[in-house]
Structures are given as structure tokens and as C-alpha cells.
Image (spheres, rainbow, N blue to C red):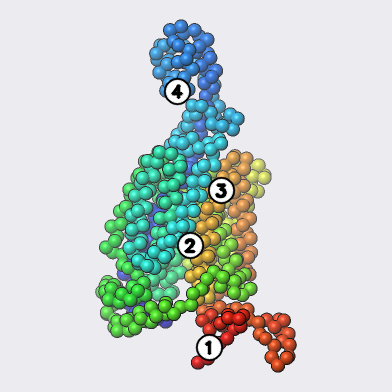
């Protein structure tokens, strides 16, 4: 145990000071959920109508209004222009208007298209018919931004600190988010959503790391699983219910998100990061404040400077590992690929189910609310049983449940009961959402325990990259179900990949109660000695060797001798 963790135990592993910081940092998740998941509402496709204006114009001309120029009548292609014309001629009779609903003549957008009800980006920029896929492409662009932002912010937070990056990026996020309400075209809007996604990804990284560096290891599972993201998703349903115009919705949610910046004076910098940068005095002041707030005696900090120097020296002498080291043995390669697939599936299914909420039957806003609500018991379940059932069984149960209930929707469709049993369809979708939410949380803890210490950050980083790819793909899977006759198709994809993941986790080693691995197990080829052929695995064996003691020059492996 490090000197820093010993001091945290003296001050309280998860005392009032840490609880306050954890709650305040977790509060960032609520507006982040609004920013990330508003495409559920912004991309909503209301009903639209196409009027046969040509037939209407011909009928008006045939009525022989001699004082009205026929060329003027030919320009009538909207209800407002028609009302103006009828008032001009003082029309008193009945007028037959031929309209079609939700149709695309020749696959194109009809002239004078009109939308009902909710004002979304779809109705603003007429993203239907041959433009139908644009909304989901914009969402994929946003998720690509999340990938870029997460990668860049990890480096920035290591250079400039967790606290500063958290608040600076959130402040910029609020500004860009607010500005997106005034986008002049969907292309400009897509560019802004990319920037918004990058800032969301960045804030999420620091939001996850900062609380973990304030508590002792036994509280990290709790802090990593529990948060206010689901609360944000539930609140989004209320925002959407009362504000049916997408521009006002963006303005209101972004404006409300700036108030979290007032927590600047109550969220501390990570003492662990400060010590790693040699800023011992600042770390001591924060730990002293923690002691006073937790009503604990101020500990002796005499060893902290020595700890800080050793941490800095260790960083300088640290061997540089790369993603190739994840393939240093067959066992680690297998584990890495399975975990990366698991994160890909978790992200694709989780965000896919969220974005697909707009395609579910029933009330859109209730569906969004329940979509967030079901996440809470799923995460509580993980916290309660993760150490009792073991990592593999917990992940497998949750992933399998997500897969089974997703497939159940396909079965209802094949039985022709999808419309008749619409409530049951939503229930199955919500149970599947709960399964993938809990499964992803459990898989994150599982992944951190499987990778050896020397490549743990690289391993989790590779998994996170896979998750972001899954998030980019998710809106395109949702697009597969945009047509009524293809509504179950996204759930078929979700169910298939989730069931495969639920089975593959059994190929991973169980880590419950097992010490975390610190070193890599690499393949070693031993030369035969004294002319005697070594037949053990054809001369191959596995050894646990610290890579700093490995010299690959001339293809040989040599050990440092003390």
C-alpha cells in the first residue's frame, strides 16, 4: 500500500469530504446525459403531409377567376399562401385538397411538405425521404467526437490537472451546445455536434477518474458504478415533454447546465495527481482540508515528499509499453480481444437502445423516463452481487438477459403481435436496457482486474476505443429499424452481439478474490542446451518476466543480474 493510500485511510476511506466531492463531480453527469442523448428528441421524426398542389392549382385556374393571373396561382404551394389567396378572392365554397401522409413521391421530398406536432431538426431541415439517414449520421458524427475528445483529454488531464480540465471543458461545452440551437443548416449543426461530442467525451474521462483518486481501492467499484447519468436521462424526458421545439430545448438544457460550474470552489484537485507532479505543498493543503472536514487529526506528511519523489522517479524510469504488448502472449491476446469486443457490444447496444427509444411504440417521453429509471436497479445489482457471484457470472447474466429480451421482441414480430402487445414490447426493451447497463458497468471493473498493472492503462484504453467505435456504429443500427416493417431489426442485432458476449466472458479468467497481476507473461523460446533438444512445447514455454529486464537485441532474452 502506498503512503498516499495510508493517509487516505487515516482521513477516512470515503469520508464526508470525499462524499461531497463525489456527489458534486457526479452531478456533471446529469447535463452530460442531456447533451449526449438529446438526439433522441432532436432527431424525432413527426408525421408529414404532401399536398397535390398541381391538381389544386389546375382546379383554381379552371374556376376562371379572370381577375387573377394564372402565373400567381401556379406559385401557391403552402397552406399559408392558399389562405392568403382564398381571402383575396373572398372564396366561400368548399375546396378539396388531396393530401398523402408520410409518403415520398419517387423517393424524393415533395414540394411544400408540412410537418405536424413536434419541431425537431427533421422538420426544420426536412430530413425525410432521401434525406432520412442524415439525422443518424449527425449522431454518429457526434459519437466520433466523443472518441477524439476522450483520447485528447486523457493527455490534457495528466498535464494540467483533473480539476482545471473538468471545468474548462464543461464551460466550453455549454457555450458550443447553446450555439448549436442557432445553426443555419444541418451541415453547420453536424460540425457543432462533433465539437460537443468531443467535449462530452473529455468531461466524462475526468468525471470518472477524479473521484477514484480521492478514495481507497475498496470504494472504487462503488464510485465507478454509481452516478447521476441515469437521473439525467430521466430528467431529459421532462425537458422534452414541456419543450416541443428543438431550438428552445437546446437553449434551456444548455443554459441550465452552466450552474454546475459554481461547484468550482468545492471540488478539489486530485492530491494523487499533485504528488505525481511534485506539488507536495498543494497536496498537503488539500489533505489537511480533508482531515478537518472529516473531523480527523491531521496526519504526519513527512513521508509524502519522499513518496512524491519516488513517483516522479518511477515515471522517468518507467518502461514504455505499447498496444503491441497486449499481444505478448496467447492468453493476454485472447483476453484483450474478448474484452475489447465486450466493450464494443456494451457501447453499441447501450447507445443503440437509447437512440432507438424514438422508434418504440407508446409515449416517447415515458419511454425515455423508464429507459433511465431501469439503469438504477441494474447498477445497484452489480454493486451488491459483483463480489458474491464473481465477475464472469455477473457479466454473463446481465449480457445474456440483454440478448434474450432483445430477441423476444423479434419473436413478437414474427408472431404478428408487435402492435397488439406494444406494452410488452416496451417492457422487453427496458429489461434489455437494464441488462446492458449493468453488464457494461461490471465489465469495466472486470477489465481493470484482468490486465497486468504494467499495461492496465493501455488495455483499458484499447477497450474504451472499442466502445467509442460501438457508439459510432449504434445510430446506424438504429436506422435499420426506421421503417415500420423493420422495427425489430435493431433488437435482432443487439440480441445477437449481446448473447455472443455473454458466452465469450466464460473464456476469461475469474478475478474475484485474486491478486491483481503486475507483470506480463510472454512467450519465451529456450535454446537447447548441450546439444540436447528441448521438446517442451517444441522449445517454447511461458515465463513471467518484467519487461524492464528483457533485452530483445539479436532476438535473445537476457536477465539483469544484481
Can you tell which of label 4 and label 3 is closer to the viewer? 3
Residue located 51% across and 57% down the image = 468
The answer for how far apart the CA atoms under marks 4 and 3 are is 35 Å
Give the residue displayed 44% in from the left and 19% down from the top.
82
Label 4 to label 1: alpha-carbon separation: 85 Å
Return the disc, 4 or 3, that comes first in the chain's sequence: 4
- Numbered badge on residue 560: 1
**SS class, disc 2:** helix
Depth order, front residue of 405/84: 84
The local secondary structure at tag 1 comes to loop
| Residue 46 placement (x, y as % from top left) | 49, 36
Within 10 Å of the Cα at label 2, are there few (<14), some (14-19), or many (20+) other Cα atoms? many
Question: Picture coordinates of residue 54 (x, y %)?
Answer: 54, 19
Q: Is residue 121 above or below residue 350?
A: above
Q: Which residue is mark 2?
A: 379
Q: Mark 2 vs mark 3: give the one in front.
A: 3
Residue placed at 57% from the left, 42% from the top? Answer: 482
Pointer 2 or 3: first along the chain: 2
| Numbered label attached to residue 79 | 4
Which residue lies under the disc numbered 3? 476
Q: Earlier in the sequence, mark 4 or mark 2?
A: 4
**Secondary element at tag 4:** helix
Q: Is residue 405 above or below residue 421?
A: below
Q: Earlier in the sequence, mark 1 or mark 3?
A: 3
Residue 550 falls in image quadrant: bottom right
Amino acid at each position: 500500500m502506498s503512503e498516499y493510500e495510508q493517509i487516505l485511510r487515516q482521513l477516512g476511506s470515503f469520508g464526508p469530504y470525499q462524499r461531497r466531492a463525489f456527489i458534486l463531480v457526479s452531478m456533471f453527469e446529469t447535463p452530460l446525459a442531456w447533451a449526449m442523448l438529446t438526439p433522441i428528441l432532436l432527431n424525432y421524426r413527426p408525421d408529414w403531409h404532401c399536398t397535390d398542389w398541381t391538381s389544386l392549382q389546375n382546379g383554381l385556374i379552371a374556376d376562371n377567376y379572370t381577375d387573377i393571373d394564372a402565373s400567381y396561382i401556379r406559385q401557391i404551394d403552402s397552406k399559408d399562401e392558399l389562405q392568403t389567396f382564398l381571402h383575396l378572392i373572398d372564396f366561400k365554397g368548399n375546396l378539396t385538397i388531396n393530401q398523402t401522409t408520410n409518403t415520398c413521391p419517387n423517393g424524393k421530398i415533395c414540394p411544400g411538405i408540412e410537418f405536424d406536432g413536434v419541431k425537431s431538426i427533421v422538420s426544420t431541415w426536412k430530413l425525410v425521404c432521401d434525406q432520412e439517414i442524415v439525422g443518424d449520421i449527425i449522431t454518429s458524427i457526434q459519437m466520433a467526437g466523443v472518441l477524439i475528445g476522450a483520447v485528447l483529454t486523457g493527455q490534457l488531464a495528466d498535464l494540467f490537472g483533473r480539476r482545471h480540465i473538468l471545468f474548462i471543458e464543461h464551460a466550453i461545452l455549454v457555450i458550443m451546445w447553446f450555439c448549436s440551437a442557432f445553426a443555419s443548416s444541418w451541415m453547420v449543426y453536424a460540425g457543432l455536434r462533433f465539437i460537443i461530442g468531443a467535449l462530452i467525451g473529455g468531461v466524462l474521462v475526468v468525471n470518472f477518474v477524479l473521484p477514484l483518486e480521492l478514495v481507497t481501492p475498496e470504494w472504487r467499484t462503488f464510485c465507478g458504478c454509481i452516478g447521476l447519468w441515469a437521473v439525467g436521462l430521466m430528467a431529459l424526458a421532462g425537458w422534452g415533454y414541456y419543450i416541443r421545439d428543438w431550438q428552445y430545448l437546446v437553449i434551456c438544457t444548455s443554459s441550465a447546465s452552466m450552474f454546475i460550474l459554481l461547484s468550482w470552489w468545492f471540488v478539489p484537485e486530485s492530491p494523487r495527481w499533485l504528488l505525481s507532479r511534485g506539488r507536495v505543498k498543494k497536496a498537503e493543503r488539500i489533505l489537511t482540508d480533508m482531515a478537518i472536514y472529516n473531523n480527523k487529526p491531521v496526519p504526519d506528511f513527512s513521508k509524502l515528499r519522499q513518496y512524491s519523489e519516488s513517483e516522479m522517479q518511477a515515471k522517468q524510469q518507467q518502461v514504455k509499453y505499447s498496444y503491441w504488448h497486449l499481444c505478448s502472449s496467447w492468453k493476454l491476446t485472447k483476453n484483450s480481444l474478448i474484452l475489447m469486443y465486450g466493450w464494443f457490444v456494451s457501447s453499441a447496444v447501450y447507445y443503440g437502445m437509447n437512440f432507438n427509444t424514438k422508434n418504440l411504440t407508446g409515449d416517447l417521453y415515458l419511454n425515455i423516463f423508464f429507459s433511465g429509471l431501469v439503469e438504477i436497479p441494474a447498477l445497484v445489482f452489480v454493486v451488491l452481487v459483483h463480489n458474491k457471484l464473481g465477475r464472469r457470472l455477473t457479466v454473463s447474466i446481465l449480457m445474456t438477459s440483454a440478448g434474450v429480451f432483445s430477441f423476444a421482441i423479434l419473436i413478437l414480430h414474427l408472431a404478428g403481435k408487435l402492435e397488439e402487445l406494444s406494452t410488452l414490447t416496451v417492457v422487453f426493451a427496458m429489461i434489455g436496457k437494464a441488462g446492458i447497463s449493468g453488464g457494461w458497468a461490471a465489465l469495466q471493473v472486470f477489465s481493470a482486474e484482468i490486465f497486468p498493472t504494467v499495461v492496465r492503462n493501455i488495455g483499458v484504453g484499447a477497450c474504451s476505443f472499442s466502445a467509442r467505435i460501438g457508439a459510432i456504429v449504434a445510430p446506424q443500427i438504429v436506422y435499420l429499424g426506421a421503417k415500420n416493417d423493420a422495427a425489430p431489426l435493431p433488437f435482432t442485432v443487439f440480441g445477437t452481439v449481446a448473447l455472443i458476449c455473454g458466452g465469450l466472458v466464460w473464456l476469461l479468467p475469474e478475478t474475484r478474490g485474486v491478486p491483481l497481476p503486475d507483470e506480463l507473461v510472454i512467450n519465451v523460446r529456450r535454446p537447447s542446451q548441450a546439444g540436447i533438444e528441448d521438446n517442451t512445447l517444441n522449445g517454447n514455454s511461458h515465463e513471467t518476466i518484467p519487461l524492464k529486464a528483457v533485452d530483445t537485441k539479436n532476438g535473445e532474452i537476457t536477465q539483469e543480474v544484481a
